[in-house]
Amino acid sequence: MADRRDTQHTAGLRADLDKRPAEVAAMFDRVAQRYDVTNTVLSGGLDASWRRATRQALGARPGQTVLDVAAGTAVSTVELASGGVRAIACDFSQGMLRAGAARAVPKVAGDAMALPLADASVDGVVISFGLRNVADPDAALREFSRVTKPGGTLVVCEFSRPTWAPFRTVYLEYLMRALPRIARAVSSNPEAYVYLAESIRAWPGQPDLAGRLQQAGWADVAWQNLTGGIVALHRARRPA
């Protein structure tokens, strides 16, 4: 692994769809420098509205503690922390956490499949655009349940499948062709966005992800489509 990082240091680094954690973390280390601006450009400025919708879906109350998994530079954590909520940013990319060091929220390094938190220690968990990058998403969903208090809430904000077939075709074409080209102009590691486009295309649609949440033990699973289904918010409750 060390040799691979050294040889690709100047050329850029991307992960493969087998999602080895060390490779994925290294890839995100390389995109951290311009991650936020790249996301804004690639989403056409919609990323801020997706973050607001995620916070609203979580519905955390003042004084509650929530965990933002795969928080990256913690821009999503700051959104979750509004209104007196204690939001903790967690990511396994040290580079991403360093890039967000100026954001005044608690931060912890940790893997979604082995969170550094005690059982039933948070009121809610959020993961935004990160679950599809986990080597074993089902293990991560069970781990989220472990750290969530009974009755607590999970929100998964993730790229999904547009519901209108003609739009879905255009969107997939954008993913595989236009997205990597735009990334070359704005990203600090454009090669990573080839992987990210592939991972979005390979990710299951809304009903399939809902089924995986239920299999992991979450209850009251429902989803809300954003931007025509480009993004879906899945919300679930940890049973008492």
Image (cartoon, rainbow, N blue to C red):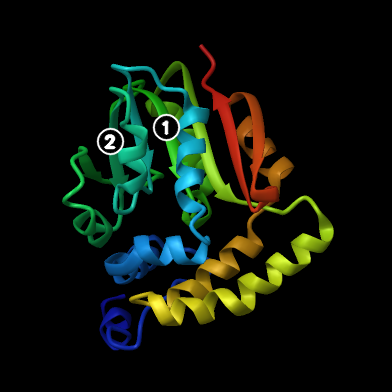
Q: Secondary structure at mark 2?
A: strand
Image side of residue 158 versus residue 67, left or right: right
Q: Name the residue: 36% across, 34% down.
A: 80
Tag of residue 194:
none
Say which of 99 and 154 sits in front.
99
- On screen, residue 196 above or below 58: below
Give how far across and how far down residue 83 sits, in percent: 32, 24
Where, quadrant-wise, is the N terminus in this rendering? Answer: bottom left
Q: Amino acid at mark 2?
A: Ile
Image side of residue 133 versus residue 186, left or right: right
Q: Is residue 22 visible?
A: no
Give how far across and how far down residue 159 sits, in percent: 59, 53
Q: Amino acid at mark 1?
A: Val
Q: Earlier in the sequence, mark 2 or mark 1?
A: 2
Q: Residue furthest right?
A: 165
- On screen, residue 173 above or below 87: below
Q: Tell me the quarter of the picture where residue 25 sits.
A: bottom left
Q: Is residue 3 visible?
A: yes
Q: Residue furthest top?
A: 240
Give how far across and how far down residue 170 sits, in percent: 74, 68
Image side of residue 155 versus residue 37, left or right: right
Which residue is under mark 1?
A: 125
Q: Name the residue: 20% across, 37% down.
A: 106
Give how far across and how far down residue 37 sits, in percent: 37, 64
Q: Secondary structure at mark 1?
A: strand
Distance from the alpha carbon under mark 2 to that under mark 1? 10 Å
Image side of residue 63 versus residue 157, left or right: left
Q: Name the residue: 30% across, 32% down.
A: 87
- On screen, residue 224 above or below 188: above
Q: Classify mark 2: residues with Cα within 10 Å, few (<14), some (14-19) or many (20+).
A: many
Marks 2 and 1 in Cβ contact (< 8 Å): no
Which residue is under mark 2?
A: 88
